[in-house]
Amino acid sequence: MLVVHMRRHTGEKPHKCTFEGCNKAYSRLENLKTHLRSHTGEKPYVCEHEACNKAFSNASDRAKHQNRTHSNEKPYVCKILGCTKRYTDPSSLRKHVKTVHGPEAHITKKHRGDTGPRPLGAGLPPSGQGQELHMEKEEGKREDCKLMVPDNTLVSENTNTHST
């Protein structure tokens, strides 16, 4: 497992797609197997909801579908003061923030020009002058505040991360 982890740092991708004209390569064999399904059309992960026959090439996409389509849960909450909107997926929340609260309300790490984590509250605009929202692909990897994550992870992650 350490060898696979180290590939993140070295960039080594020994698992190469064998389909003609495709140059994709992966550090993990499982990722290659999932990719190969894009060529074969295989979709072994069927939605477990009754009367739904959707199928997916990987378990993650099936889980997203089931949570977003067949659940009433809306864990992504708009954090703009006074707004009570909630969404099933982060892309819908991002669209809401940009269209309703304006593009300046959605400031990302890229827009700030940050290169790494920052302490809680550092660089945030004063209250009432727009609020920052961000989301990382791998939740729990950043040390700064997560304003755009499911509600149930917000308190525990920030408390643990910023209590030093």
Image (cartoon, rainbow, N blue to C red):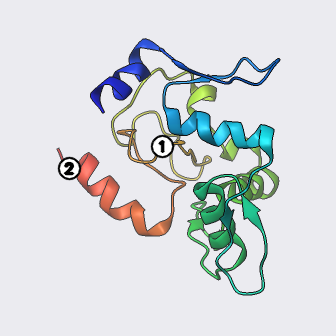
| Residue linked to disc 2 | 163
- Which residue is pictured at 60% across the width and 39% down the height? 33
Give the image location of residue 150, x and y in percent. 51, 64
Please identify the residue farthest to the left as the structure is shown. Answer: 164
Judge by depth and name the residue closer to the eye, 72 or 86.
72
Give the image location of residue 41, x and y in percent. 80, 48
Q: Are marks 1 and 2 in contact (CB under 8 Å)?
A: no
Q: Secondary structure at mark 1?
A: loop
Judge by depth and name the residue closer to the eye, 103 or 138.
138
Give the image location of residue 158, x and y in percent. 33, 54
Determine whether, in the image, residue 90 is placed left or right of residue 10.
right
| Residue 108 showing in the rendered view | no
- Which residue is pictured at 30% across the width and 33% down the height? 1
Judge by depth and name the residue closer to the eye, 10 or 116.
10
Determine whether, in the image, residue 35 is placed left or right of residue 140.
right
Vertical order, 91 against 21 (above or below): below
Vertical order, 4 against 51 (above or below): above
- Which residue is pictured at 47% across the width and 20% down the height? 115
Q: Which mark is residue 138?
A: 1
| Residue 62 showing in the rendered view | yes
Mark 1 nearby-residue class (10 Å; few <14, some 14–19, many ≥20): few
Judge by depth and name the residue closer to the eye, 4 or 88.
4
The answer for how far apart the CA atoms under marks 1 and 2 are is 21 Å
Determine whether, in the image, residue 55 is placed left or right of residue 15.
right
Q: Secondary structure at mark 2?
A: loop
Quadrant position of residue 157 = bottom left
Q: Earlier in the sequence, mark 1 or mark 2?
A: 1
* Quarter of the figure with the C terminus: top left
The amino acid at mark 2 is Ser
**Front position among marks 1 and 2:** 1
- Which residue is pictured at 74% across the width and 55% down the height? 101
